[in-house]
Structures are given as structure tokens and as C-alpha cells.
Image (spheres, rainbow, N blue to C red):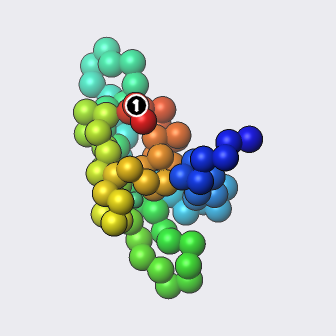
Amino acid sequence: MSADPVRAKALAILREQRLTLLHVACRKLADVPDEAIGRVQSSREGGATYAIDMFDGAFTCTCKHGGDCAHALAVQLVVGAGAR
Ligand SMILES: [Zn+2]
């Protein structure tokens, strides 16, 4: 069991089904997807929705952490892409 709080949050996002993947793409002959777009609903009722964009393995997110966050990690865990 990991003590990493970002990872724990990312796993909660997946467990609570708050991630919606809108787009996943893989360049020809690439090993892993290099493009993804997702949305994560905040756990708070009436909370924000965050948009995560991954291109060339680099993540950006509309939350204040800007891509180094649980939202991006949740996308990464599902699509199996990008180094962290
Ligand atoms: Zn985020």
C-alpha cells in the first residue's frame, strides 16, 4: 500500500468513478498512448470539474497544480502512459 497521497487520491478518483476519458490515441507503432483527454469530477458535491490533457506524454490539468496532480495520475493509471 502506497503512502503517496497523490496516488491515494488518484486511486480514489478511479474507485469512485469520477474520471471520464474522452480521448485516447496512440501514434502508429508507439508502445503506449501519447494523447489523452479526460475529465475528473471533484469529490465535493457541486465541486469543480477538471480537464486533463496529455500530449506526447506530458500532462496538463486545469486545477491549481497544473498537471502534477492526482487528476493527471488517474488518467495515467488508466491509459498506461507518461512518466511520472
Ligand atoms: Zn489536476
Can you tell me which quadrant of the image ligand 1 is in? bottom left
User: Residue 25's spot in the image, x, y percent?
Assistant: 33, 35
Residue type (three-letter) at the residue carrying disc 1: Ala
| Distance from mark 1 CB to nearest ligand 1 atom below 8 Å | no
- Taking depth in this image into account, of 71 and 64 the one nearest to the observer is 64
- Taking depth in this image into account, of 47 and 19 the one nearest to the observer is 47
Please state, as top left, top right, bottom left or bottom right, where the C terminus lies in the image: top left
Q: Is residue 52 above or below residue 83?
A: below
Instruction: Report if residue 57 is visible in the image.
Output: yes
User: Residue 28's spot in the image, x, y percent?
Assistant: 27, 19
Q: Secondary structure at mark 1?
A: loop
Left or right: 70, with 60 as reference point: right
Instruction: Report if residue 51 is visible in the image.
Output: no
> Where, by quadrant of the figure, is residue 52 drawn?
bottom left
Are there few (<14), some (14-19), or many (20+) residues within 10 Å of tag 1?
few
**Which residue is at the far bottom?**
46
Q: Which residue, given by chain and number where applicable, does mark 1 sit on?
A: 83
User: Residue 8's spot in the image, x, y percent?
Assistant: 63, 52
Q: Is residue 13 above or below residue 33?
A: below
Please state, as top left, top right, bottom left or bottom right, where the N terminus lies in the image: top right
Left or right: 68, with 18 as reference point: left
User: Residue 12's spot in the image, x, y percent?
Assistant: 63, 57
- Taking depth in this image into account, of 77 and 38 the one nearest to the observer is 77
Q: Residue at x 68, y 42 (%)?
A: 2
Q: Residue at x 31, y 15 (%)?
A: 29
